[in-house]
Image (spheres, grey):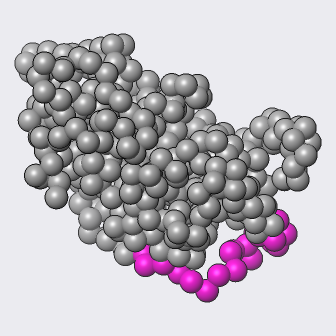
Amino acid sequence: MASLFGYIRGTSTILSLMVSCIFGTVFIYGPIWPIMFLWPWLYRRVVEVLAAMWQTLIVITCEKLLGIQVVVTGDAIDRHDKTVILMNHRTRLDWLYFLCYVFHAKILNRHKIALKSALKWVPGVGWAMQVAAYIFLDRNWEIDQNHINRILRYFVELDSKHNILFFPEGTDLSKDNLRKSKEFAKKSDLTPFDYVLQPRRKGFTHFVNTLRNISGIQAVHDVTVAYPFNIPQEEVDLLKGDFPREVHFHIRRYPIEELPKDEKQLGDWCQDRWAEKEELLCQYYATEPKARKFQSQKIPPFHPRTFLLWFALFVWASHAVLSAYAVIVSPFFRWYMVIIVLSYLMQGLVFGGAEKVELFVYDQLRKPWEEWGKAVNTGGAGDASSSRKNPYDKYLR
């Protein structure tokens, strides 16, 4: 049972992050929206830097304030690698702890996450992820396929050198999800797993082949996550103050040239990686908690960046206090906050989110004025949209 101190510690930590995020989306992102219409390339670069600065607050919270130790082995993710990062979804919070490695590897500003669309509606946090252009999926292939095509092409055309975290399992390893996974394996004549869920191949193959067709991928990084001690499964565990003592990540890099192009063969390749994960995790959890580690001699660069961590804490704590003070004492700032919050709500209602507004604006600016409002073809690499003159092309070369 969680202690009273645990509840206070967990709840105050999460609320502090959410308050900081809400003020950040209002007073940091709000004023830069006009850049989106003037120069999309610059807008995306500025947002990437600002998003990374705030996510640094999550890193220092995990490492310095909560004492979570992140251990990484295997291959490094290069700063300029355009890659899809595959990871097993042990808990609902794996992506949160992985930010620590991404920060220390100096690739945080390039980091994107593919995740379920329900998260985009969380006030503050969801708005921030929308502006950061995370890839939200509705679990409706007709809708998701078109959105994936549009946003991946957008990243490539703006030369974002993205690293995209993707969970092929689609959900976390809870008892109920594991039961469903085993039922699916039995029905599909697949080997059942105990430590991972059966991967959903369709989304993975579409991501990889779409990026391959538009020269937007250089490698796939396969990440296996494991927890040697306690395993907090979901967000409510954090509110109770149940934080993992350690999180282990093992990374393997596969150059895109090594992956098959055929969709079925590529799906089989993904299935083989999950079979390897099952065996790796079986060996990992067979030992006592203190002895659990991935048997790899390779340790990727892990830059401490300690000053930047504490500086981020000072900046964002100060920003939250000053923002709260301004809203309390100034009618102007109160009305400004109301307008920006309503803008986020309207973007969600009319367009489906801030990231879709960004895509819409970019699509329109790629066209002659008389073509505004007409749909842009987002099909394969050779479609008409790929040959349409981009007014920002001179800045992207």
User: From what the image shows, is residue 170 above or below residue 328?
Assistant: below
Q: Position of residue 190 (x, y in %)?
A: 87, 49
Q: Position of residue 75 (x, y in %)?
A: 53, 76
The answer to whether any part of residue 297 appears in the image is yes
Q: Position of residue 287 (x, y in %)?
A: 82, 72
Is residue 372 a member of the stretch shown in magenta?
Answer: no
**Relative side of 277 to 320, left or right:** right
Is residue 300 a member of the stretch shown in magenta?
Answer: yes
Please provide the residue range marked out in magenta: 281-302
Front-most of residues 154 and 304: 154
**Relative side of 335 to 210, left or right:** left
Front-most of residues 367 and 87: 367
| Residue depicted at 19% across the width and 34% down the height | 366
What quarter of the picture does the N terminus occupy? top right
**Relative side of 364 to 142, left or right:** left
The answer to whether any part of residue 354 appears in the image is no
Front-most of residues 31 and 27: 31
User: From what the image shows, is residue 100 above or below residue 9?
Assistant: below
